Image (cartoon, rainbow, N blue to C red):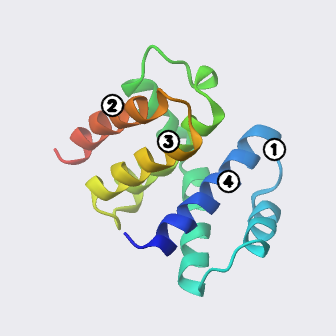
Amino acid sequence: MSGARRKSRVVALQVLYEVDSVGHKPEEVIQHALSEQVLIEENIEFVREMVFGVLENKKPIDENIKKFAPTWPIAQISVIDRNILRLAIFEILFDNKTPIKVAINEAVELAKNFGSDSSPRFINGVLSSVSNLATR
């Protein structure tokens, strides 16, 4: 995956984090986040697709998190980990434009950069289970 795509995922994650943690309006957060980045139109569109795709499918995405991380109530998963999972599950189960392995690898990279020490393993474990569902 290109560096620009990864940068777009980071922006989408930042937007989802802010929307989830403080409840700001998604469109305003996207505008603000994009004003601080230099992205080509294709990647700006990718950010929008990711953010609104996650928000529109949040309920079934969160159901998958509950199913595959049953010992962790959604509210107890850190905001960053929760939104990394939401992004990746959206890509794996709903968007279908990114190869599953790439979506998982990108999520693990986000977890390494923004999560806690245990985040990458947690994210990888949940997404591996989700991907088994997607490949059946």
In the picture provided, is 18 more to the left or to the right than 83?
right
Q: Pointer 2: what residue? A: 125
Residue type at the position of mark 4:
Gln
Q: Which class describes the residues within 10 Å of circle 4: few (<14), some (14-19), or many (20+)?
A: some
In the image, residue 49 sits, relative to residue 79, either above or below, namely: below
Give the labeled residue for mark 4: 14
Q: Are marks 2 and 3 in contact (CB under 8 Å)?
A: no
Inspect the image, locate mark 1, and give the three-letter code of the amino acid beneath it: Gly
Q: Quickly name the residue at label 1.
A: 23
Instruction: Give the structural element (helix, strand or loop) at label 4.
Output: helix
Q: Position of residue 45 (x, y in %)?
A: 58, 77
Packing grade of label 2 (10 A; few <14, some 14-19, many >=20) is some
Alpha-carbon span between mark 1 and mark 2: 28 Å
Number of other residues with Cα within 10 Å of mark 1, as a class: few under 14, some 14 to 19, many 20 or more: few
Residue at the far top in the pictured view: 71
Query: Where does the N terminus fall, quadrant-wise?
Result: bottom left
Seen at 55% across and 31% down, the residue is 116
Q: Position of residue 70 (x, y in %)?
A: 42, 17
In this view, the residue in front, 42 or 133, is 42
Q: Is residue 43 left or right of residue 121?
A: right
Q: CA distance from mark 3 to mark 1?
A: 22 Å
**Residue 62 image position (x, y, % from top left):** 51, 35
Give the CA separation, mark 4 to mark 3: 13 Å
- Between disc 3 and disc 1, whose residue precedes? 1
The numbered mark at residue 111 is 3
C-alpha gap between disc 2 and disc 4: 22 Å
| Quadrant of the rendering where the C terminus is positioned | top left
Assign a secondary structure to mark 2: helix
Q: Does residue 115 sit above or below 16 in this rendering?
A: above
Marks 2 and 3, the one that precedes in the sequence: 3
Give the residue type at disc 3.
Answer: Ala
Report helix, strand or loop for mark 3: helix
